[in-house]
């Protein structure tokens, strides 16, 4: 396959994000937000044909739905997927979502609920925990955070633990911690996971032009270099063509400030 000569950082993130589902088999794939959704669609059409995708309403589709106004496009339905069946997939662990928390800590815990102050009166109130607690216990989750900084990857614990991680202190005495399944964490700087010793965060790949020291300086907790840490692979021309088809209105260009190129200048 031919590597694309020009690509944006958003397109790089979509391409590497698709690999999150590569070994999943038949699970419900949910990408929350434009880039995770495009990544799931790209995975379906390339490296993970067995994943299931919905139209966002009540049907399964084999051809991922394009972003934005559909015009004359007509979805090709392949099955019925109402909320009851979605929840059956969630509770049984047959789902892999890519989510976008506002904060993540060294334990892999995520926060979408509130920032600062007391829980009863935070400085910033957001969504509440929503479905994060149950989802993080029941099925695998990967993450996408568009701005890698110490405000997002915090020094201590997240302000509100909305999704569980590997901090055993947060489980009641005598309770067995859940079998937490965290996939990859993708940011505008790198890709990492929590599969280091004792679930330590380890960098799997650095985006082109980024150094490990830059990533560590932007992270509130220690990072490890994974064995075989590499540079994030550029998208192929085939992947770029699929991304363009799934995003005909170029929504992807609006996600990262300034729509930067995929290769940072020295």
Image (tube, rainbow, N blue to C red):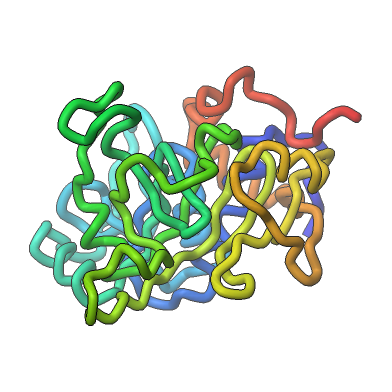
**Of 209 and 157, the residue lying toward us:** 157
**Of 9 and 156, the residue lying toward us:** 156
Q: Residue at x 56, y 74 (%)?
A: 198
Where residue 175 sits, quadrant-wise, is: bottom left
Q: Position of residue 200 (x, y in %)?
A: 59, 65
**Of 132 and 119, the residue lying toward us:** 119
Check the image and report above or below for 175 versus 8: below
Q: Residue at x 46, y 74 (%)?
A: 24
Q: Residue furthest right?
A: 266
Q: Residue furthest top?
A: 258
Q: Position of residue 18 (x, y in %)?
A: 55, 57
Check the image and report above or below for 71 versus 197: above
Check the image and report above or below for 34 versus 89: above
Q: Position of residue 74 (x, y in %)?
A: 29, 43
Q: Quadrant of the C terminus?
A: top right
Answer left or right for 114 relative to 107: left
Q: Residue furthest front?
A: 173
Q: Quadrant of the N terminus?
A: bottom right
Answer left or right for 165 relative to 11: left
Q: Residue at x 60, y 49 (%)?
A: 221
């Amino acid at each position: 396959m031919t590597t694309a000569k020009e690509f944006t950082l958003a397109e790089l993130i979509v391409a590497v994000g698709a690999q999150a589902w590569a070994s999943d088999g038949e699970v419900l794939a949910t990408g929350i937000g434009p880039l995770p959704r495009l990544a799931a669609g790209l995975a379906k059409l390339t490296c993970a044909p067995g994943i299931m995708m919905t139209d966002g309403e009540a049907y399964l589709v084999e051809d991922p739905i394009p972003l934005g106004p559909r015009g004359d496009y007509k979805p090709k339905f392949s099955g019925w997927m109402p909320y009851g069946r979605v929840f059956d997939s969630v509770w049984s662990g047959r789902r892999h979502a890519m989510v976008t928390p506002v904060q993540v800590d060294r334990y892999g815990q995520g926060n979408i609920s509130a920032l600062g102050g007391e829980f009863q009166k935070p400085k910033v109130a957001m969504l509440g925990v929503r479905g994060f607690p149950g989802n993080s216990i029941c099925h695998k989750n990967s993450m996408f955070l568009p701005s890698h900084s110490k405000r997002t990857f915090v020094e201590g614990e997240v302000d509100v633990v909305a999704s569980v991680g590997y901090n055993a202190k947060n489980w009641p005495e005598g309770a067995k911690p859940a079998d937490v399944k965290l996939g990859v964490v993708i940011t505008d700087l790198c890709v990492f996971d929590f599969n280091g010793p004792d679930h330590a965060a380890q960098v799997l790949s650095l985006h082109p032009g980024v150094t490990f020291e830059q990533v560590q300086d932007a992270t509130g907790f220690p990072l490890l270099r994974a064995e075989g840490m590499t540079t994030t692979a550029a998208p192929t021309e085939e992947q770029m063509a699929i991304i363009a088809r799934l995003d005909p209105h170029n929504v992807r260009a609006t996600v990262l400030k300034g729509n930067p190129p995929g290769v940072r200048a020295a």
